[in-house]
Image: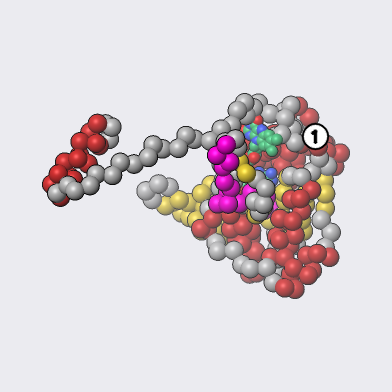
Amino acid sequence: MNIVVCIKQVPDTTEVRLDPKTNTLIREGVPSIINPDDLSGLEVALRIKDKDPENVKVYALSMGPNQAEYALREALAMGADEAILVSDRAFGGADTWATSCTITAAIEHIDYDLVIAGRQAIDGDTAQVGPQIARHLNIPAISYAEDVDVEGDKVIVKRQFEDRYHILEAEMPILITTLAECAQPRYMTIRGIYEAQEKDITVWGLKDIEDKLDLSNIGLKGSPTRVKKSFPKEGKAAGVLLNDLSADEAAQAILAKLKEKYII
Ligand SMILES: Cc1cc2nc3c(=O)[nH]c(=O)nc-3n(C[C@H](O)[C@H](O)[C@H](O)COP(=O)(O)OP(=O)(O)OC[C@H]3O[C@@H](n4cnc5c(N)ncnc54)[C@H](O)[C@@H]3O)c2cc1C
């Protein structure tokens, strides 16, 4: 059984700050990490492999610039068997449509049973790429997985909704998108890190996957959407401090403010 895990390298958004003068993101010194939902997806795949190491192969696949190789080496150090970097200038500036078309073309070169993507990337935040890949591959998708189990050629998924869960069962091939809380990712081992440095990462450029691609669907030119402008949200107004009020007066003052702002 072959599992392909889609991994996106993202800036650690908990560390991104705004320059108050230019209102732009300060990217310098911001570390790149594997997107948290994808790390959990990789852990799901590795647990399936742990149960049947002889027969399960885990591929980590990322589309991005050369530096995405670091994310793939981390995946190898955790236990992935193979790493594939899909990288070519022609793929740059892709929106979710062009990204999913390109990743799909790469997956079509692998004999897959199960495809796992994260629910959402913390930088782009769209949660579109996984379901789009499933559509292009013409396989079913189960998103928002909070628990995944495999029995024979079936997957059993606990899918999260706002107010409930569904337990879904489906036959492979299928695509699942995982939530970060689906599986606590394991640490890399020292031996894993050492071996990951020695392993080759397969790099596929346009030439390697163009047989499965419609060239009008790649990169900036093949993207139906364009980010025209990006800017930070305006800061909220400073709060007001009311001193020396009795408890009743304080409650009345809060009530009046909430009514004034149409909150209640
Ligand atoms: C120069 C540039 C220009 C861009 N222009 C646009 C634009 O015009 N319009 C627009 O909408 N977006 C644009 N983007 C953003 C880009 O489209 C998104 O980052 C990308 O499409 C993925 O969407 P997302 O981050 O929302 O992923 P999500 O859909 O939130 O990701 C879900 C899951 O899909 C998988 N996945 C997503 N991306 C990758 C990847 N690269 N490799 C492997 N797995 C992946 C991961 O498993 C991830 O958890 C631009 C990006 C760049 C760098």
Q: Is residue 158 left or right of residue 92?
A: left
Using the rendered image of the protein, determine whether residue 157 is visible from the camera's viewpoint: no
- Disc 1 packing (10 Å; few <14; some 14–19; many ≥20): some
What colour-coding does the image apply?
secondary structure
Residue in the picture at 55% in, 61% down: 183
Which stretch did the figure color magenta? 4-21
SS class of the residue under badge 1? helix
Of residues 185 and 115, the one nearer the viewer is 185
Q: Nearer the viewer, residue 236 or 179?
A: 236
Q: Is residue 83 left or right of residue 100?
A: right
Q: Amino acid at mark 1?
A: Ala
Q: Quadrant of the N terminus?
A: bottom right
Q: Residue at coordinates 81% horizontally, 37% vertically from top-left?
A: 89
- Residue 139 in which image quadrant: top right
Q: Position of residue 165 (x, y in %)?
A: 42, 52
Q: Is residue 208 rendered to the left or right of residue 95?
A: right
The vertical placement of 234 against 60, above or below, is above
Q: Is residue 229 magenta?
A: no
Depicted 56 relative to depicted 98: above or below: below
| Ligand 1 placement by image quarter | top right
Q: Residue 162: x and y, percent?
A: 40, 46
| Count of marks overlaid on the render | 1
Pointer 1 residue Cβ closer than 8 Å to ligand 1: no
* Residue at the disc numbered 1: 90
Q: Where residue 64 sits: x, y (%)?
A: 74, 44
Could you say where residue 87 lies in the image, as x and y percent from the top left?
A: 79, 43
Taking the spot 82% from the left edge, 63% from the top edge, the residue there is 199
Determine the residue located farthest toward the front in the rendered image.
Answer: 244
- Quadrant holding the C terminus: top left
Q: Nearer the viewer, residue 195 or 3?
A: 195
In the figure, 97 relative to 110: above or below?
above
Is residue 18 a member of the stretch shown in magenta?
yes
